[in-house]
Image (cartoon, rainbow, N blue to C red):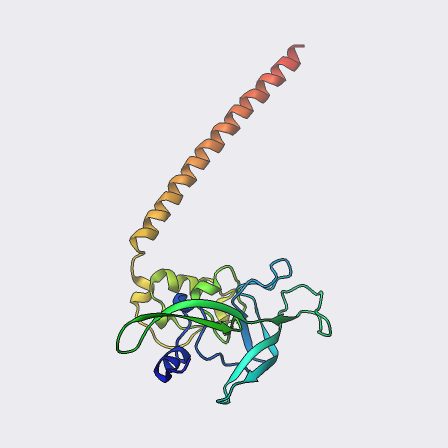
Amino acid sequence: MEDETLIDLLLNLTSDSQTGYTIGRLPLLPQMPVMVCDNFDVSGGIVNGSEGILKSVRYTTDDHGTWCATSCVVRIEDSSEHSFTELLPHECVILPKTLSFKVSYPFSGQSVTVKRTQLPLLPAFCITDYKSQGRMMPKVILDIKSACSIQSAYVMISHATALENLLILHPFNPKHIMSHMNGDLCKEHSWLQILECKTILWTTSQNFHHAEAMALKMQLMASS
């Protein structure tokens, strides 16, 4: 690729669904926290969302002196203890991944498809509300100002294990925690409540019939 304008655009892309959650420039520094963005070894615990500490990076340089990472080693505590050759337990090799995505060409707006080969990693000094789901965190610093809805704010707050270990980064608009749930979430919540009532009624009915059957059985045994 030789078009400097397009190169500059690609190097400054941020992580989103369009780019497969990769970023234009991948900042890597040994001992920094990183998050893996691909399933390398599901059974071994090296999966999309795994967090670890970057231990080392191998790279090449092109004619312009640009560093191109070819592999790296990440220590992931939740991974299997079976180590790679010459690596310590929980140290994992992360290899580049190639993906395609479309971008709009500057000025003309023409859509072009590009292929990017990059280590599937992201800096993990902080994480989004979406990525925090399913985790319990002993200490949390929250940026509620960035919450896009009350659901987002709830997810941020609810994953802290103790109130005294929760810190709000800066002031935020009260609407982030006082607005109503969106329509789709309200419908889902209502559907879950109906399902809960149906489940209770069905379970009660089953238990009632079971109790009747047991009483009849005991009556027959007593008469015999």
Quadrant housing residue 107: bottom left
Residue 155 is left or right of residue 219, and the answer is left
Is 198 above or below relative to 166?
A: above
Q: Residue at 39% x, 81% y: name it.
A: 7
Residue placed furthest toward the front: 2
Q: Residue at x 59, y 75 (%)?
A: 71
Quadrant occupied by the C terminus: top right
Q: Determine which quarter of the picture holds residue 211.
A: top right
Residue 216 location, x and y as percent?
A: 58, 17
Residue ranking furthest to the left: 108
Q: Depth check: give the residue in front, 63 or 94.
A: 63
Decide: is 64 above or below 213: below
Q: Image check: 39 left or right of 171?
A: right
- Give the residue displayed 30% in from the left and 78% down from the top: 106
Residue at (52%, 24%) from the top-left corner?
209
Residue 84 placed where, x, y %? 70, 69
Query: Total number of numbered labels?
Result: 0
Q: Nearer the viewer, residue 121 or 102?
A: 102
